[in-house]
Amino acid sequence: MTTLARRRWLYFVGDSIASVCTGALVAAAAGSIVPVEWPHWPAMLAGMATGMILSVPCWLAAGLLLGMIEPMIQIMLGGMVAGMVATMVDLPYADPRLWALVVLGAQCGLGTSLVVAGADFALRRGEHSG
């Protein structure tokens, strides 16, 4: 594996970890803040706003390690998706609700990280940028 490919792989792993952590944090916060009784549209907008607000400090923290531009799209998109999903989902098991929200948010973060990485790969047509 070349140095460039290795570095690209390390950035992908770092971005994914940051996005998973952000998604977990945002989903736990948004799911706890927005009342369950709200209709889906206002809950979704409140969750998205919460995700955008809470993603900024996560992005700044990750930016110190990964650079400011590299993780921004994944973290912000992951936070928005996790906030929206956490406020709209109807969890059938309400006992460990916070843990279920954390896992759901982590899945949203990982999913958005994979989508962004796939889009990046497709746009570059598999070539490494240097």
Image: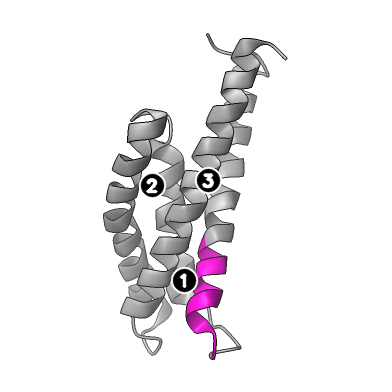
User: Residue shown at 54%/48% (left/top)?
Assistant: 112
Q: Looking at this view, is 124 or 5 the one in front?
A: 5
Question: Would you place residue 108 above or below residue 6 in this image?
Answer: below
Q: Is residue 83 visible?
A: no
| Number of the front mark, 3 or 2 | 3
Q: Main secondary structure of the magenta part?
A: helix
Amino acid, disc 3: Ile
| Residue, disc 2 | 76
Counting residues from the start of the chain, the first of labels 1 and 3 encountered is 3
| Residue, disc 3 | 17
| Left or right position of 61 against 104 | left
| Number of the front mark, 1 or 3 | 3
Q: Looking at this view, is 100 or 125 the one in front?
A: 100
Question: Residue 71, located in which quarter of the rendered image?
Answer: top left
Q: Which residues are magenta?
A: 95-105
Q: Looking at this view, is 28 or 42 the one in front?
A: 28
